[in-house]
Amino acid sequence: MTDTIKPFSIAVDDAQLDDLRQRLNATRWPDAQTCEGWEQGMPLDYAREMAAYWLEKYDWRRCEATLNSWPQFTAELDGLNIHFIHRRSPHSHALPLIITHGWPGSVIEFHKIIDALAEPEKYGGDAADAFHVVAPSLPGYGFSSKPASTGMSVQNIATVWGKLMARLGYEKWVAQGGDWGSMVTQCIAESEAAHCLGIHINMPIVAPDPETMDQLTPTEQSALEDMAFYNEWDSAYAKQQSTRPQTLGYGLADSPVGQMAWIVEKFYAWTDCEKNGVKHPENALSKDEMLDNVMLYWLNNCAASSGRLYWESFRTPELAPIEMPLGCSVFPREIFRASRRWAEKRYANIIHWNELDRGGHFAAFEQPEMFIAEVRNCFRQLR
């Protein structure tokens, strides 16, 4: 390791956890929603239930130990201290892979897949499919430092990731991402083509093809209907974070329940969590898993800094054509979904395309075995 890459271990001070407990105890609750379910946001009863669990049963030290079970580092890149997990495979032939989370996610999303990607033979796979796994926290997220000036767009993050992989000594590598990670990964295909062999995404960013509007497939019709619902009922968070993230930050930085509700609502909305006709986030993720993710926002006070990525990049999405080999796994409860024929209008070299029968926006978190299989099947073609 060079002088600018340093080993990192998470050791949250007890005072931070005491402060969290005090704040949870002192929560000033709003009145209940005036409708059934989640139509106005996270229901008061469930918010109280989650807060009580957080206060009385949740164990941060368990999560901390999980994260510390993998080698972690920080690297100074473009004036930022970037936190990342670096799980090298014991296999010399392993393919280097950089995998990027989004909002409201974190590296916690990958806790079920890291070891299986690095040592597949221990998890029912073939050692030939091994990866060296690099999982960084986005700038302004988790344990990465916060940009102090404007300009840290998805395009610039892509170049930072290229520098990180070079710093680690990887000449040729592949990249994967969902949510903002998908945007960063698609930008890697443009800026890092000299070193990146191919990419895999689980949220394709493509426009519906106007020429297909008179002959839509049922899958395309469903995608358009879900997009209309998102625009009308589910996108206010993005408008707020892409215009006034700082104002939002004051409330979320001061209230753990506010930060929790802001994130857990998206686990309800974006996971494949319907069971017997009823949607509930715990049909997809446990309380501990959701709170582990919330804690990376709360402990690092990154509500505002994470939201600023929307201010930088949400209003001007990158839609340039991509020539690099690309794989795409479309999970049925993803926010933005595309058909292959729509995707082919932007992606010139699709080497893997699969439409799964379950799973949502947080694919690695919700359906780790399916996600692992998709990544292996895609990149097997580039080894």
Image (spheres, helix red, strand yellow):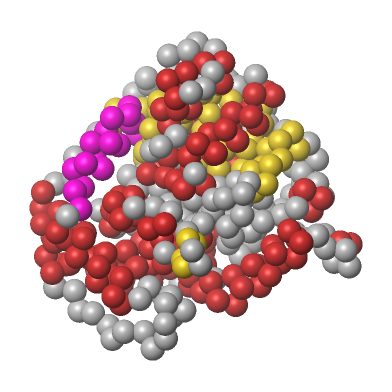
**Residue for point 42% across, 82% down:** 36
**Residue for point 26% across, 64% down:** 50
Q: Residue 25 location, x and y as percent?
A: 13, 69
Pick the residue in front: 125 or 210. Answer: 125
Q: Judge whether residue 352 is colored magenta.
A: no
Regarding residue 12, the answer to whether it shows in the image is yes
Image position of 160 with respect to 318: above or below: above
**Residue for point 76% across, 61% down:** 218
**Quadrant in which the N terminus is drawn:** top left
Q: Residue 349 location, x and y as percent?
A: 78, 36
Say how many tags the image has: 0
Pick the residue in front: 58 or 135. Answer: 58
Q: Which residues are magenta?
A: 58-77
Which quadrant of the structure image shows residue 136?
Answer: top left
Image position of 165 with respect to 92: above or below: below
**Quadrant in which the C terminus is drawn:** top right
Q: Residue 324 location, x and y as percent?
A: 73, 35
Regarding residue 188, the answer to whether it shows in the image is no
Pick the residue in front: 264 or 282. Answer: 282
**Residue for point 65% across, 31% down:** 378
Q: Residue furthest front?
A: 276
Q: Residue 266 location, x and y as percent?
A: 45, 63
Image position of 20 with respect to 156: above or below: below
Image position of 114 with respect to 260: above or below: above
Q: Is residue 116 left or right of residue 4?
A: right
Q: Residue furthest bottom?
A: 34
Q: Judge whether residue 64 is colored magenta.
A: yes
